[in-house]
C-alpha cells in the first residue's frame, strides 16, 4: 500500500492554454498545477517565460515582465540564467518591472530587492540597464506618490505587463498588497503586516530592523497583466494556497482576487498543494485508488469531521462522504473501522526505544535491541524539550544513552534589549553578593556599548552572540550561566 497520489499531480509543462476541466479540481477557482518538486515546477515556469521572450523576439517586440523577489522565484531565475548562458536565450528585448521594494532602504543593503534582482538575474543576463524598473526605496517620503503614479504610467507606456510572476505571503499578500487591499488598488506606499515582518525578520537579523513600509504595485496593477503565474513551495504555504484557490474571494486574502483574472495559473509543489481538496481529501472529488494509507487517512478524517469515534462510523457515514467505493471494496464499515482502529492502536507504545523481551509481532515495541544510543537533533535549543520532552525523559528513564545535538545556538532569535537587561541584572547580582564586582560591571558595559554601536541589521559582536546563545537555550538560565562563565564555577 503506497503513499503516492500521483494521479493528482500535474504533467511536465504548464497548461498551454485554458486549463482542462477535471472532476478532481472542481473546487478550484483558479487553474492550478501541482508538480512533484519546486525544482521541476521552477523549470516549467522558466521555460514558459523563455518561450514568451522568444516569441516576442521573433515578432520584434519587447517582452514586459513583472518580477517578484523572495525565496520562491530564485530557482526560476537560476534556470533563466542557465538558459541564457547555455542556450543563448537573450534578454535584449526584455523590460522588467519589479513588484515591490522595502521603504526606506538603500539599494546596496543586504535585504534590498534591487540587490536581490541583480544578484539572482540581472547581473548574469544581457538585459539593458534602462529596461530595469524597481520601486525606489531611497525616495524622500513626499516624492513617493508621484513616483508610484509614474511607475504605473511607465508600465502602460510599454503596453502593460505581458507576464507577471508572483509568490504569496502567509497573509495572502501578492506583491506587498496586504489584507485589506482593494482589488483596484494601484502602486503605492503600504504598511507591512505584522506577520510579513515576522517572516522577514531573519533576513534583517531581527524583527525590529524590518522596515515598516514598502512600495508595492497594486492589486489592480497586477490584475492588468496579460498573464499571471503565482508560485508557492513548501508546507508553510499550503493553507493560504487552499484559501486562495478554493476559498471565497475576499479582501482578507488579496491573492483570491486572482480568481477573477482570465489568465492566471497557480503553480505548486506537492507540499504547497497539501491542503487542496484533491490532495487532502481526494475521495470528495472523484474515485480513488484505495491504498491502505489513503483508507486510514480517510477514516481518521471522517471520524474527526463527524466528531464520532472510529468504531462508531456507519456505512451511511462512509457513503455520505464520497467513500462508497471504499465500503464496496473493503466494507462493511464495521470491518474497516476495526482495521484502522487496530492500526492506530498499534502505533502507541510506552517504549519508544524498544522493550526488552516484548512480543513485537503485532506492536511497535522492538524486543531487540533494547538499549540504544539516541541522538535528538534539536534545530533550535529548546525544540528538544518543547516538541518531545516526554519522550526525552522516558528514553533516559528506560536506560538509553541519550544525547542532544543542538544545531544552532539560537542567538539570532534574542532581542538586543534582553541581553542588555540580563547583563545589567548580572552586574547587580554580582554587586549584591560581591561575587566579582569588576567583572560584572565591565561585562555590562561591553555588552551595552557593543549593542549601541551596532548598525541596524548588522551581526552582533562574538561576545554578544555567545551571551544570546546562552539566553535562547532556555530564557531563565542566562543569569546563572553568565555567573558560571565569569566565575568559572560549576552551576551545580
Ligand atoms: C516579493 C513579493 C512577495 C513575496 C512573498 C513570498 O517581491 O512580492 O509577495 O512573493 O512574500 O515570499 P517568499 O517567496 O520569500 O516566500
Image (cartoon, rainbow, N blue to C red):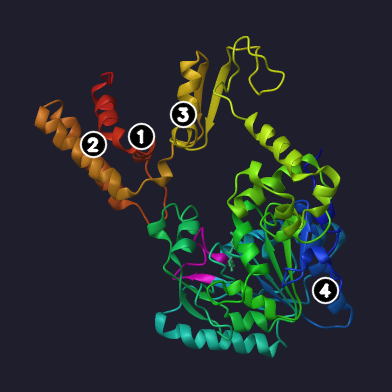
How far apart marks 1 and 2 lie (CA) works out to 15 Å
- Which residue position holds label 2? 443
Q: Which mark is residue 470?
A: 1
- Identity of the residue drawn at 73% across and 68% down: 27
> Do labels 2 and 4 touch, CB within 8 Å?
no
Q: Position of residue 343 (x, y in %)?
A: 69, 33
Q: Residues within 10 Å of mark 3 (few under 14, many from 20)?
A: few
**Mark earlier in primary sequence (2, 4):** 4
Task: Report whether the residue tagged 1 is closer than 8 Å to ligand 1.
Answer: no
Q: Position of residue 394 (x, y in %)?
A: 48, 22
How far apart marks 1 and 3 lie (CA) works out to 23 Å
Q: Nearer the viewer, mark 3 or mark 4?
A: 3
Question: In screen coordinates, is 334 left or right of 108?
Answer: right
Q: Nearer the viewer, mark 1 or mark 2?
A: 1
- Which residue position holds label 3? 390
Q: Nearer the viewer, mark 2 or mark 4?
A: 4
363 is within the stretch colored magenta: no
Q: Residues within 10 Å of mark 2 (few under 14, many from 20)?
A: some
- Identity of the residue drawn at 89% across and 78% down: 58
110 is within the stretch colored magenta: yes
> Could you say which quadrant of the image residue 61 lies in?
bottom right
**Mark earlier in primary sequence (1, 3):** 3
Front-most of residues 429 and 281 = 281
- Which residue position holds label 4? 52
- Identity of the residue drawn at 74% across and 63% down: 267
Q: Position of residue 264 (x, y in %)?
A: 74, 74
Dominant SS in magenta = loop
Q: Is residue 205 visible?
A: yes
> Could you say which quadrant of the image residue 223 lies in?
bottom right
Question: In screen coordinates, is 431 left or right of 383?
Answer: left
**Mark earlier in primary sequence (1, 4):** 4
Amino acid at each position: 500500500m503506497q503513499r503516492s497520489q500521483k494521479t493528482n499531480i500535474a504533467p511536465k509543462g504548464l497548461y498551454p492554454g485554458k486549463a482542462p476541466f477535471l472532476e478532481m479540481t472542481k473546487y478550484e477557482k483558479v487553474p492550478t498545477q501541482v508538480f512533484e518538486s519546486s525544482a521541476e515546477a521552477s523549470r516549467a515556469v522558466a521555460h514558459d517565460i523563455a518561450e514568451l521572450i522568444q516569441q516576442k523576439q521573433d515578432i520584434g517586440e519587447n517582452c514586459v515582465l513583472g518580477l517578484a523577489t523572495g525565496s520562491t522565484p530564485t530557482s526560476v531565475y537560476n534556470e533563466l540564467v542557465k538558459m541564457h548562458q547555455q542556450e543563448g536565450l537573450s534578454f535584449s528585448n526584455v523590460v522588467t518591472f519589479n513588484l515591490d521594494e522595502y521603504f526606506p532602504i538603500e539599494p546596496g543593503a543586504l535585504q534590498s530587492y534591487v540587490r536581490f534582482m541583480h544578484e539572482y538575474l540581472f547581473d548574469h543576463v544581457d538585459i539593458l540597464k534602462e529596461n530595469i524598473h524597481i520601486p525606489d526605496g531611497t525616495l524622500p517620503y513626499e516624492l513617493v506618490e508621484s513616483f508610484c503614479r509614474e511607475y504605473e504610467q511607465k508600465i502602460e507606456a510599454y503596453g502593460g505587463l505581458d507576464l507577471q510572476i508572483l509568490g504569496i505571503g502567509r497573509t495572502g499578500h501578492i506583491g506587498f498588497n496586504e489584507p485589506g487591499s482593494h482589488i483596484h488598488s494601484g502602486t503605492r506606499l503600504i504598511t507591512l503586516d505584522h506577520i510579513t515582518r515576522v517572516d522577514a525578520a531573519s533576513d534583517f537579523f531581527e524583527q525590529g530592523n524590518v522596515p515598516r513600509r514598502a512600495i508595492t504595485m497594486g492589486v489592480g496593477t497586477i490584475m492588468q497583466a496579460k498573464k499571471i503565474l503565482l508560485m508557492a513551495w513548501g508546507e508553510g504555504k499550503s493553507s493560504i494556497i487552499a484559501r486562495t484557490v478554493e476559498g471565497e474571494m475576499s479582501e482578507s486574502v488579496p491573492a483570491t482576487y486572482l480568481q477573477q483574472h482570465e489568465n492566471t495559473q497557480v503553480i505548486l509543489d506537492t507540499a504547497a498543494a497539501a491542503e487542496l481538496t484533491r490532495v487532502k481529501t481526494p475521495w470528495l472529488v472523484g474515485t480513488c485508488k484505495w491504498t491502505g494509507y489513503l483508507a486510514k487517512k480517510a477514516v481518521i478524517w471522517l471520524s474527526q469531521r463527524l466528531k464520532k469515534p472510529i468504531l462508531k462510523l456507519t456505512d451511511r457515514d462512509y457513503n455520505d462522504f464520497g467513500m462508497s467505493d471504499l465500503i464496496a471494496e473493503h466494507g462493511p464499515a464495521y470491518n474497516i473501522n476495526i482495521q484502522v482502529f487496530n492500526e492506530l492502536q498499534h502505533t502507541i507504545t510506552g517504549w519508544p526505544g524498544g522493550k526488552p523481551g516484548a512480543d513485537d509481532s503485532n506492536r511497535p515495541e522492538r524486543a531487540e535491541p533494547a538499549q540504544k544510543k539516541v541522538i535528538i537533533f534539536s534545530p533550535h535549543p529548546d525544540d528538544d524539550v518543547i516538541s518531545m520532552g516526554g519522550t526525552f525523559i522516558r528514553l533516559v528513564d528506560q536506560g538509553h544513552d541519550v544525547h542532544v545535538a543542538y544545531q544552532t545556538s539560537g542567538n539570532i532569535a534574542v532581542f538586543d534589549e534582553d541581553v542588555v537587561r540580563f547583563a545589567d541584572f548580572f552586574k547587580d547580582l554580582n554587586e549584591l553578593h560581591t561575587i566579582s564586582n569588576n567583572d560584572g560591571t565591565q561585562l555590562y558595559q561591553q555588552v551595552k556599548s557593543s549593542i549601541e554601536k551596532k548598525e541596524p541589521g548588522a551581526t552582533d559582536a562574538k561576545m554578544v552572540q555567545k551571551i544570546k546563545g546562552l539566553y535562547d537555550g532556555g530564557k531563565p538560565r542566562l543569569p546563572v550561566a553568565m555567573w558560571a562563565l565569569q566565575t568559572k564555577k560549576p552551576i551545580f
